[in-house]
Amino acid sequence: MNMMKDMMEKMMSGMVKPEDMPQMMNAVMEKVFSKMSAEDRIQFVTTMMPKCLNMIFSEMDASAKQNLAKEMISKMMSIFEEQLKTVSK
C-alpha cells in the first residue's frame, strides 16, 4: 500500500492539485479492488458506501443534497440493472 501512503503524504503536504485527485483516486481504487475477493468487495461497499455518502451529504445544503441524491440514484440504478442483465443470461 505504498501508493496509498504516498498519495496521503502528498495530499497532506498540499502537493496534490485538486484536478489531479480523480486520477490518483482511480489508480488507488483499482489497485485496492484488484486484490480483493468478491466477499471483501461486498463487505467494503456495504460498509463504506453509506459512511462515505453520509460524510459527503453532511456539508451540503438541501438543494445540493437533492441534486446529488437524484444523480446517484440514476447512476446506481443503471449500474445495477446492467449487472442484473449479465447474470440473468
Image (cartoon, rainbow, N blue to C red):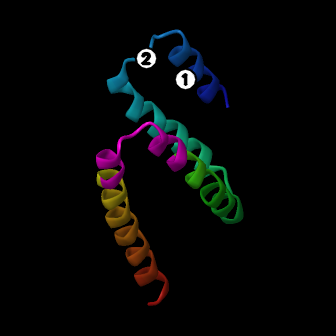
* Camera-side residue of 18 and 6: 18
Q: Position of residue 51 (x, y in %)?
A: 60, 48
**Does 75 lie within the magenta span?**
no
> Looking at the image, which residue is at 37% across and 18% down?
17
**Location of residue 83 by image quarter:** bottom left
For label 1, the SS is: helix
* Residue 7 marker: 1
- Crowdedness near tag 1: few (<14), some (14–19) or many (≥20) residues, C-alpha within 10 Å: some
**Location of residue 15 by image quarter:** top left
* Camera-side residue of 50 and 6: 50
> Looking at the image, which residue is at 47% across and 11% down?
14
Residue linked to disc 2: 16
Please name the amino acid that badge 1 sits on. Answer: Met
In the image: residue 35, left or right of residue 27: right
**Location of residue 41 by image quarter:** bottom right
Q: Main secondary structure of the magenta part?
A: helix
- CB-based contact (under 8 Å), mark 2 and mark 1: yes
Please name the amino acid that badge 2 sits on. Answer: Val
Q: Position of residue 73 (x, y in %)?
A: 37, 64
* Camera-side residue of 82 and 56: 56
Q: Is residue 40 above or below residue 57?
A: below
Q: Which residues are magenta?
A: 53-66
